């Protein structure tokens, strides 16, 4: 594994407290901080976000308990065409990545929880104690947080504060509970999760006790993502990148586990509604130029993304991924 010794980039922590408390002027002030970060890094840290450490810890524990089960038990909930359920070890290869030619499967397994009421979704739950209650509470807390952040993104883009609200009021999101077993030595071009940018509007990633996440700076150097207790990492994804005509950056990242213990990650992937059209925002058009990305609904974009990256959908063909 090619870790670097480069010093970590100075990524400021954005304190959401004043905004969440409704303090006057906080929306505009924090929106400006957000804009600066998204135009230069696309990988930010938020503190005072209102999600309890107890719930975060419980969700990590739910991930650990699920993955500790025998394989046959996990396979009873094998991932379906709506991407709900258990994705077996090496069940994905990140082929949509524009930053690396990923040709080896990711050395992780995962369980996906989807929002109830999403097209084609019926969540199936494992019997591990408290799993459903914990993951649903976590899902709901992070969905609410992501939605609270929408006015910040809207103002950062000089749009009315409620611009994204109706476009993201039944989000096409998911919670992923990943397990990366320790790997002493990764093969050439093999990773816990291969270099990629997320498909999302934003991803909310709880801090991990086991290191392994790296981000690629704009100068091409990979650095260990700083671990800052009490913060979430907020990662701009490709949906927001496309929507802003490339103005907001989606930062390349990857993960390994070279520790001697299992590593779990619990990213919440926030997407707009399936039917929302992702088309160059009015404030991001460049005079006299065509937008950089063709318009696409969120649902179509995700069908393309999933059909490429997840083996069971790749084998089933495009119709299955669009379900
Ligand atoms: O394992 C991590 O820390 C990051 C996971 C990730 O980037 C992803 O699941 O998209
Ligand atoms: Fe990611």
Image (cartoon, rainbow, N blue to C red):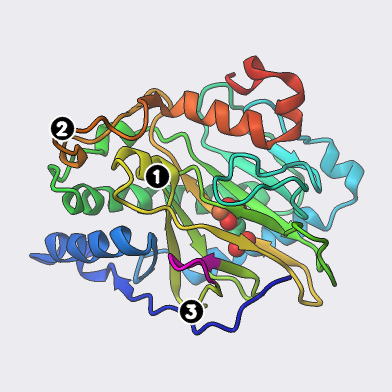
Q: Is residue 21 above or below residue 161?
A: below
Quadrant containing ligand 1: bottom right
Residue 252: image location, x then y, percent:
51, 57
> Which residue is at 45% across, 65% downward?
233
| Residue corresponding to mark 1 | 201
Circles 3 and 1, Cβ within 8 Å, touching? The answer is: no
Closer to the observer: label 3 or label 2? 2
Q: Residue at x 70, y 38 (%)?
A: 85
Farthest-out residue, top: 319
Which disc, if any, is residue 288? 2
Which span is picked out in magenta? 215-221
Q: Is residue 127 left or right of residue 239?
A: right
Indicate whether 318 appears above or below 122.
above
Q: Is residue 258 above or below residue 102?
A: below
Disc 1 on helix, strand or loop? loop
First-in-chain label (1 vs 2):
1
Which quadrant: the C terminus? Answer: top right
Prevailing SS of the magenta stretch:
loop
**Mark 3 crowd level (few <14, some 14–19, many ≥20, 10 Å Cα):** few
Residue 29 at what x, y percent from top left?
Answer: 14, 66
Camera-side mark, 3 or 1: 1
Label 3 element class: loop
Please tell me whether mark 2 sits on a helix, a strand or a loop: loop
Would you name the residue on which mark 3 appears? Answer: 229
Give the alpha-carbon distance from disc 1 to disc 2, as whole Å: 27 Å
- The N terminus: image quadrant: bottom right
Q: Is residue 49 visible?
A: yes
What is the x, y in percent for residue 65?
76, 59
Q: Residue at x 77, y 45 (%)?
A: 127
């Amino acid at each position: 594994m090619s870790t670097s010794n480069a010093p970590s980039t100075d990524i400021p922590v954005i304190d959401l407290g004043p905004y969440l408390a409704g303090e006057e002027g906080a929306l505009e002030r924090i929106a400006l901080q957000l804009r600066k970060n998204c135009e230069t890094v696309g990988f930010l840290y938020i503190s005072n976000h209102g999600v309890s450490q107890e719930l975060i810890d419980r969700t990590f524990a739910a991930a650990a308990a699920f993955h500790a089960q025998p394989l046959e038990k996990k396979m009873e909930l094998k991932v379906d065409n709506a991407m709900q359920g258990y994705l077996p070890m090496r069940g994905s290869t990140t082929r949509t990545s524009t930053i690396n030619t990923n040709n080896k499967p990711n050395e992780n397994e995962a369980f996906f929880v989807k929002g109830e009421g999403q097209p084609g979704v019926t969540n199936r739950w494992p019997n591990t104690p408290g799993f459903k209650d914990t993951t649903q509470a976590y899902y709901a807390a992070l969905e609410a947080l992501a939605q609270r952040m929408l006015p910040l993104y809207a103002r950062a883009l000089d749009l009315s504060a409620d611009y994204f609200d109706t476009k993201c009021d039944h989000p096409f999101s998911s919670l992923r509970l990943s397990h990366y077993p320790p790997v002493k030595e990764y093969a050439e071009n093999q990773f816990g999760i291969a270099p990629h940018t997320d498909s999302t509007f934003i991803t909310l990633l709880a801090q991990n006790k086991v290191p392994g996440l790296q981000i690629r700076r704009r100068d091409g150097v990979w650095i260990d993502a700083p671990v800052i207790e009490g913060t979430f990492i907020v990662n701009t994804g490709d949906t927001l990148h496309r929507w802003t005509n490339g103005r907001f950056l989606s930062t390349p990242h990857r993960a390994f586990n070279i520790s001697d213990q299992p590593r779990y990650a619990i990213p919440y992937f926030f997407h707009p509604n399936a039917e929302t059209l992702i088309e160059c925002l009015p404030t991001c058009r460049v005079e006299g130029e065509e937008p950089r990305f063709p318009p696409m609904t969120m649902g179509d974009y995700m069908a393309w993304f999933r059909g490429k990256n997840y083996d069971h959908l790749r084998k089933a063909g495009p119709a299955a991924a669009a379900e």
